[in-house]
Image (tube, grey):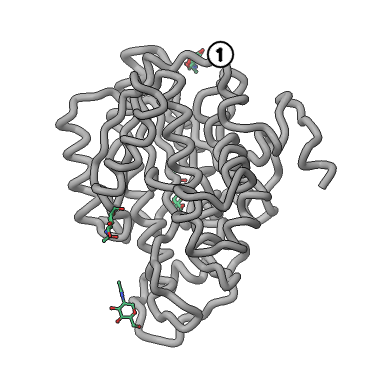
Amino acid sequence: MWWFYRKGPSGFSGASTAEEVTAGVDGHLLVAVITGATSGIGLETARVLALRGVRVVMAVRNVSAGLMAKDAIVAKTPDARIDVLELDLSSIASVRRFASEFDSLKLPLNILINNAGVMTRNCTRSCDGLELHFATNHIGHFLLTNLVLENMKSTCRDTGTEGRIVNVTSAGHVMTYPEGIRFETIRDPSGCKSAVRSLNDFIAYGQSKLANILHTNELSRIFKEEGVNISANSVHPGLIATNLFRAFGRTIIAAFFNTVGRIVRRSVEQGAATTCYVAVHPQVKGLSGKYFANCNIASPSSQASDAELAKKLWEFSLQTVS
Ligand SMILES: *[C@@H]1O[C@H](CO)[C@@H](O)[C@H](O)[C@H]1NC(C)=O
Ligand SMILES: *[C@@H]1O[C@H](CO)[C@@H](O)[C@H](O)[C@H]1NC(C)=O
Ligand SMILES: *[C@@H]1O[C@H](CO)[C@@H](O)[C@H](O)[C@H]1NC(C)=O
Ligand SMILES: *[C@@H]1O[C@H](CO)[C@@H](O)[C@H](O)[C@H]1NC(C)=O
């Protein structure tokens, strides 16, 4: 575990917390959308960005849980600026509804944090909808990103501030399937739509997080090509958190609000650190298409750097939503 505590070139390590890595950052001119912000790492990310002055829009599946999470943040940070909007990433209609509700707030958008993982409580090893859930979550974030992009582009044109898209890759998946199921080991027996099956081919290609990383890379390439000042990076939320999530599984959300104790909270604070670092730290300015872990640039698998594959996944996703 020595490397976990060792500081990388950024000056931070896997043991750094979200508050530590954002110390001194003034976010008052920034607006961020965070998906899956009601619990765990998403909630901590929302809390810390709001603490730094960022106006946070929590995109949540369960609005009453979202409002409770908002209250919890405001209790600690009374001048936190937070909106709660409904978003179910497994429903294309819900994603579109969210986008238009967000539009009607007439806010600019500087930061998009695609944090929500697959949130199917009921799924077990035999759940046939597994790929479907993964696919819709991928597609959900893909569509969400595309729908808010114009806003992000005009925000960075108008303000001269770099836009940032941060994609959190794996906590959700591990958290949802505490039995240790990995997407790449699951095969759909039958019944899923063929579109889903071909997405599954991509997933079968390597690790479960591949699709996210590939998508982020492709997005980053497109921005560079278009000369748009928006970065897109992927984030791994950190080891301790991930392991704890695996161990505690479904009870993690309850655990966060109650007490499994200091260690869980500490690890959520660390889990949110890389996301917050990539979202607002000045050191990250100009970096795009990178993969971050423990608040430093890391290298994903070689497949995840495959530009050709990234392009294919992008085209496939586009077909699916249109
Ligand atoms: C939504 O959140 C509230 C408050 O935590 C909870 O009581 C309710 O059961 C949740 N609803 C669903 C559908 O999960
Ligand atoms: C969960 O599974 C049980 C039994 O397998 C079923 O009765 C219930 O409706 C499911 N709940 C959801 C939310 O899908
Ligand atoms: C972000 O990650 C989600 C899964 O968490 C994935 O479905 C989506 O394609 C990714 N989006 C971007 C912009 O990379
Ligand atoms: C992007 O925006 C940042 C300010 O956040 C600025 O420093 C940088 O020069 C911009 N880059 C380009 C290519 O316009």
In this view, the residue farthest toward the right is 2
Tell me what residue is drawn at x 62 percent, y 25 percent: 20
Looking at the rendered structure, the kind of residue marked 1 is Gly
Closer to us: 246 or 30? 246
Task: Tell me if residue 127 comes above or below residue 1 in the rendering.
Answer: below
Q: Position of residue 176 (x, y in %)?
A: 48, 64
Left or right relative to 160: residue 260: right
Task: Tell me if residue 201 comes above or below residue 13 in the rendering.
Answer: below
Query: Which quadrant of the render holds ligand 1?
Result: bottom left
- Residue carrying label 1: 24
In this view, the residue farthest toward the left is 104
Tell me what residue is drawn at x 46 percent, y 57 percent: 313
Closer to us: 69 or 311? 69
Could you tell me if residue 235 is visible in this image? no
Location of residue 153 by image quarter: top left
Closer to us: 308 or 4? 4
